[in-house]
Structure formats: structure tokens, C-alpha cells
Image (cartoon, rainbow, N blue to C red):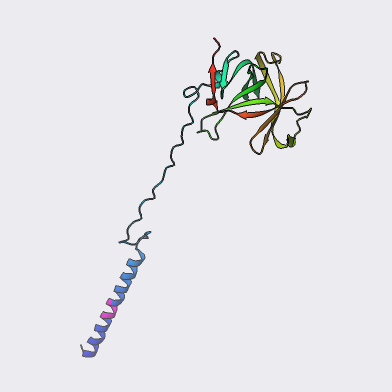
Amino acid sequence: MTPEVAAILGLSAVTLVLLLGALFATTRQDRRPLRSGSPGETPLPPVEVVQPPPRPSAGHVGIDYPDPRTIKVGDTIDRQGVRTRVLGALYLSWQGKQWTEYLLDDGTHRYQWLSIETHDGPTPDDPPHLEVLLWTPVPTQGMIPAKTTLSVEGVEFFPVERGTAAFRSEGVTSMPERGLLDFADYRAADGRLLCFDRLQGQPWNSSHAQPLPPGSINIEKKS
């Protein structure tokens, strides 16, 4: 073998080695697994989920305070320092809803109605709550409840609900034992409530409501 041929073969061998090395490096790079971070990086700590503080309990009806649904005709109730006697009750139902209204007398023939209704919570996981309203008659000077906004004593009331409820009466109510009661409920922007009701065929009556916390009522059962 001449020196020239040996030199050519040596250069060819070196070139082949370099080409194989480059091909091997390229193949390793293409098979590298994809990762979200590079080796040597400190992994981020897990995100800490902060739990909201538990909501304070508003008390339990029948445990922390008397259950107003146990009021009976003849009982005496003390509401915010005012003692009244329960003269009668109306048990009403409308479209699957049921509620009770009690006629109260404070001894001065100043009559008011106390309505008690159970409402479902905003979600199925929320417990039901009681709505307790004290209704006081207000003069509306023959006003008829319209399906639009009403202005009473300078306050705008918006229609909420209206219908005809079936009722059963007990005690002194000035109502028949059974019958139908038309009603129309309104609400003002500040939350005040206004209601029109009438025994079918009779003139309309009107009253406004004051909400009462269930725990503000003490019940003295009839002996």
C-alpha cells in the first residue's frame, strides 16, 4: 500500500467516525422525553387551598329558641316586649306552598297578623329557614292592587306574587271556616312588603309587613 492510499483511507475512517457520532447524538436528542421543567430545577410547592371559615350558626329552631310553628290558638306570645294573645289562625295553601297566619290582640283591640312560612334554602345543601312577618293594616283608600307598580305613602312597590289561596280557619278570625282568599304581594326597593287580600266577593284589605327573627318570639302555652 502506498503512502498516498494509506492517507486517503485514514481520512475516510476519521470522516466516517465523525458522521456516526453526529448521527448518534441527533438520535439521542430526538428521543429525549418532554418534561415541564429541566433537571436540577426546584419543583414548585403545591398550591395551598385555603378553606373558608365556617359560617356562624344562627341557632336552631326548637333548641336555641322556641319554634313559632308550635303556636296555637289561645297561646300568649311575647314579641320584643309586647305581649299579645293569639285569637285565631288561618291555615293557607297555594300552589304547593303552605303557611299559617295568626290573629293577635294586644288587649287594646289593635289587631295584627303574624305569618309563618318555611322556605327552602338557596341550594339543596342549605337548610330550610323560617320567614316570620308581622302584618299591620294600612289604609289604601279603596285602592285596587294592579299588576304594575303601586305608590303608597310615597313609596313605590313592585308586584311579586298574586293568586288565590285556599284556607281553613280556627278560633276568632272574622273569616268563614273554609274558603278562598285572593292576595297580591308587593315589595319596595328597600325590602318593605305590602299585601292586598280579600275574601272572594269582598273589598280589598291592605297591610305592610315587618320581618321578625324567629328567636324574638317567646311562647306562653295555653294552660
Pick the front one: 21 or 216: 216
Q: Quadrant of the image for the C terminus?
A: top right
Q: Quadrant of the image for the N terminus?
A: bottom left
Which of the 4 quarters of the picture holds residue 173?
top right
Rendered residue at 74%/35% (across/down): 150
Q: Is residue 163 left or right of residue 65?
A: right
Q: Check the image and report above or below for 108 versus 121.
A: above
Percent coordinates x, y for residue 23 in the rendering: 33, 72
Rendered residue at 62%/24% (across/down): 115
Instruction: Name the dominant secondary structure of the magenta segment.
Output: helix
Rendered residue at 32%/60% (across/down): 41
Which of the 4 quarters of the picture holds residue 165?
top right
Was residue 16 drawn as part of the magenta stretch in this picture?
Answer: yes
Pick the front one: 45 or 26: 45
Start-end of magenta stretch: 13-17
Percent coordinates x, y for residue 106 in the rendering: 63, 18
Pick the front one: 74 or 26: 74
- Residue 43 appears in the rendering: yes
Q: Residue furthest top?
A: 223
Was residue 28 drawn as part of the magenta stretch in this picture?
Answer: no
- Residue 95 appears in the rendering: no
Q: Check the image and report above or below for 76 versus 151.
A: above
- Image label count: 0
Q: Is residue 126 left or right of residue 168?
A: left
Which of the 4 quarters of the picture holds residue 84?
top right
Percent coordinates x, y for residue 103 in the rendering: 65, 18
